[in-house]
Structures are given as C-alpha cells and as structure tokens.
Amino acid sequence: MLVSEMGIADKLANRTFKESELPKLFFAESRCFRPEISKSASEAKLYRVHEFNKLEMFAICTPTQSSKVLQMFLEMQIEIWSKLGVKYRVLDMPSEELGAAASRKYDIEAWMPGRGIYGEVSSTSNCTDYQARRLGIKYQKDGNSGEECFVHTCNGTAMASTRALITVLETFQTSRGFVPPEILKQFLPKGRHRDKLKMAPA
C-alpha cells in the first residue's frame, strides 16, 4: 500500500541529524492505493477499497525516545476517537501480528453497528531502526564523541477516510436519520447540523 509515511521517509533518506534536533514529528495527507479488496460481507463496499485518503503521523527519534513517541501517537489516536463519541478498543498486537518492520504495534478498532463488528480504523508502530538502516537516516550524538547512530522511526494513522466514514455514519444513524456527533457540527455549513440524512438500506 502506498502511504505518506513512505514519502516522508524518502525525503529523510541519507541525512544525518543532531541529537538535539530529535524527535522530529511529521504529519501528512496522502492518497492511498491497495491492490486487494475483500469480498466478504463484513469487509465489503467502503470497508476495504482500492483507494482512499489517509492522514499519517511519522517521527524520527533516538532509541530512548521511540517508546514515548509511540505512546504519544497512540494517545492522539485515542483522543480523536473519544471525541468522535464512537465505541472503540485498543489492541496491543502480539508478535505474530507484526510486520517485518514493527517492534511494537497498537491497533484501534471501532464498533461498526451496521456490520456488527469491531473494524480496524487506525494503528501505530515503533519500527526501531529497521527503516532507518535501509534508508541511511542517522543522528550524531551530542558531546565530544560525535558518534553517528541510526534513528528510530514511528508511524501512526490519524484518520483513514472510508473506515472513519463508516464508523461515524453507522454509529450516529437513528430512526430519524443521521445526526452528526457534536464534535463535527462546528465544521458543517450553518444550519446543516440540524438536517437529518436518511440512509438507504445496504
């Protein structure tokens, strides 16, 4: 899958930073593409599609900072889903569920009433120096030694458009139609937050 994480990491390739400059935090939006889609009922339609928009968080940091950065990303994700007012759960993923790059990974799954499932809506990973070694991203230690070491990288999904849309639409669907959560009303055109959007049966 193509995501902004890769674009940011590429911009940092073969660069060396001062230890005092770290951590460096990045935030970007990207258009994501994946080759596969699912034909199962629970993952049909908007849940797993070929392309979608994604807001991505990315960081380079020292080895002593990466665990704290991972927790910071997780707390930001939790704040997003809490303020939306949806039901969600946080999973500390076991080693067999980690990709080659990740040393530790958390998934957030939100309840999707229309599907009757908890669906993954965001994740965050500490990749330690796996990506940095491949990309040549280093930092120079403070002090007289000037030793150069590989940075650690962390990444996290702030929001993926389609699954967020599913979660919000299904959670706030009532017999009278869709009623936006309070946190989103401020972003709607004046008067629109009073409208009820009626959804057709799936």
Image (cartoon, rainbow, N blue to C red):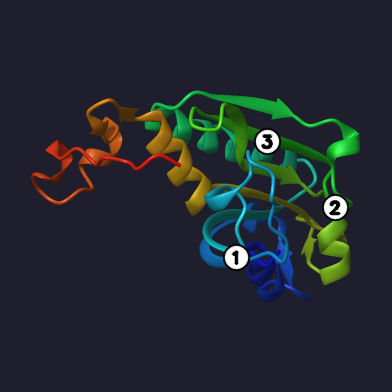
Residue 17 in picture, x, y percent from top left:
71, 66
Q: Do the residues labelled 2 and 1 touch (CB within 8 Å)?
A: no
The residue labelled by disc 1 is 32
Q: Distance between the residues labelled 2 and 1?
A: 19 Å
Residue at left 30%, top 26%?
174
**Which residue matches tag 2?**
101
The answer to whether residue 199 of the structure is visible from this angle is yes
Image location of residue 8, percent across then percent down? 63, 68
Which of label 1 and label 3 is nearer to you? 1
Under circle 1, the secondary element is strand
The numbered dot on residue 116 is none
Q: Quadrant of residue 65?
A: top right
> Are there few (<14), some (14-19), or many (20+) residues within 10 Å of tag 2?
some
Q: Can residue 146 be seen in this view?
A: no
Locate residue 6, reporting x and y percent: 69, 67
Is 78 situated left or right of 133 in this image? left
Is residue 33 found left or right of 173 in the rendered image?
right
Q: Quadrant of the N terminus?
A: bottom right
Q: Is mark 2 on a helix, strand or loop?
A: loop
**Tag shown at residue 107:** 3
